[in-house]
Amino acid sequence: MKNQHIPRKRFGQHFLVDQNVLNKIVSVFSPKDGESIIEIGPGTGALTEALLNRIRALTAIELDRDLIGYLREKFGAEESKELTVIESDILRFNFSSLIEQKEEGQKLRIIGNLPYNISTPLIFCLLEYVEIIQDMVFMLQREVAMRLSAQPGNKHYGRLTVMTAIDLHSECLFDVPPGAFNPPPKVDSTVIRMWPRKKQFEIDCRSSLAKIVSAAFSQRRKTIRNGLRKLISEDQFEIANIDPKQRAENLSVEDFVTLSNVYSRDL
């Protein structure tokens, strides 16, 4: 069966077609039968096929109706394989629904070549389900992957870094050039692995933390004294034991949590 699907710009579709890259992704992901494997945005099924060469069952979540029909036709004839295709906007999908019928304690393993135009909001959505996720392997725009894995003091360190690092470890695995895709994107890509970290911080109010972090990085060239002057007083900086002359990129995740807790307690 030949696929004539034309990649759609509005869905941010760049289909991975390099077989060597596909095999490498599946190898680092290392799926096993019996696990709850979820693929986000299967597209024309290249990664889906590579996964089903290793495991029997897979759930894929896709928004494009034309691709859903194509995937069901392509893989439906393989009686030894079980591909469940769910039609959904991934930004609105309830991942908890995927484990309701699973064994107690079983968690989701999520993989996908993420559309670049939704990758950041999708990762924020997935943070809501961190307790039911075992790990995730994603193809992302390299810049986003660098932001996820950045350390304090690095130019890529920012709001996305801090808000994800509270709950997740992030590790860049390898880069992928534009030529591995159809159509080729205008940027380089990176495969990244993310997995839940043990609880490190006591956070009084998540919304306060998000507010502090967002404000601090919205004016990242300023000192945090100036960037947070409408939120944090000199006394609060002193209580948190944080030097207000620093810039946001020099504060650790723990510093932001401490600062937000001081802020929350004074509300």
Image (tube, rainbow, N blue to C red):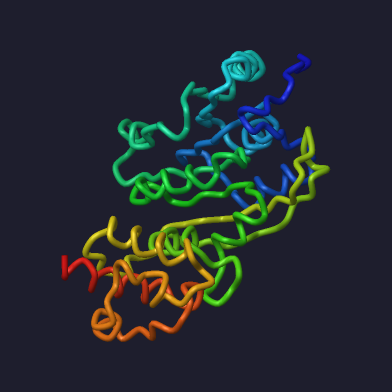
User: Which of 45/121 is in front?
Assistant: 121
Q: Position of residue 253 (x, y in %)?
A: 41, 71
Res 175 → quadrant: bottom right
- Residue at 71 percent of width and 35 percent of height: 14
Position of 87 with respect to 257 (left or right) is: right
- Residue at 35 percent of width and 58 percent of height: 210
Q: Looking at the image, can residue 78 be seen?
A: no
Q: Position of residue 139 (x, y in %)?
A: 64, 47
Outermost residue, right direction? 179
Q: Quadrant of the C terminus?
A: bottom left
User: Which of 226/155 is in front?
Assistant: 226
User: Which of 208/223 is in front?
Assistant: 223
| Count of residue discs | 0
- Residue at 63 percent of width and 13 percent of height: 73
Res 11 → quadrant: top right
Q: Quadrant of the N terminus?
A: top right
User: Which of 212/93 is in front?
Assistant: 212
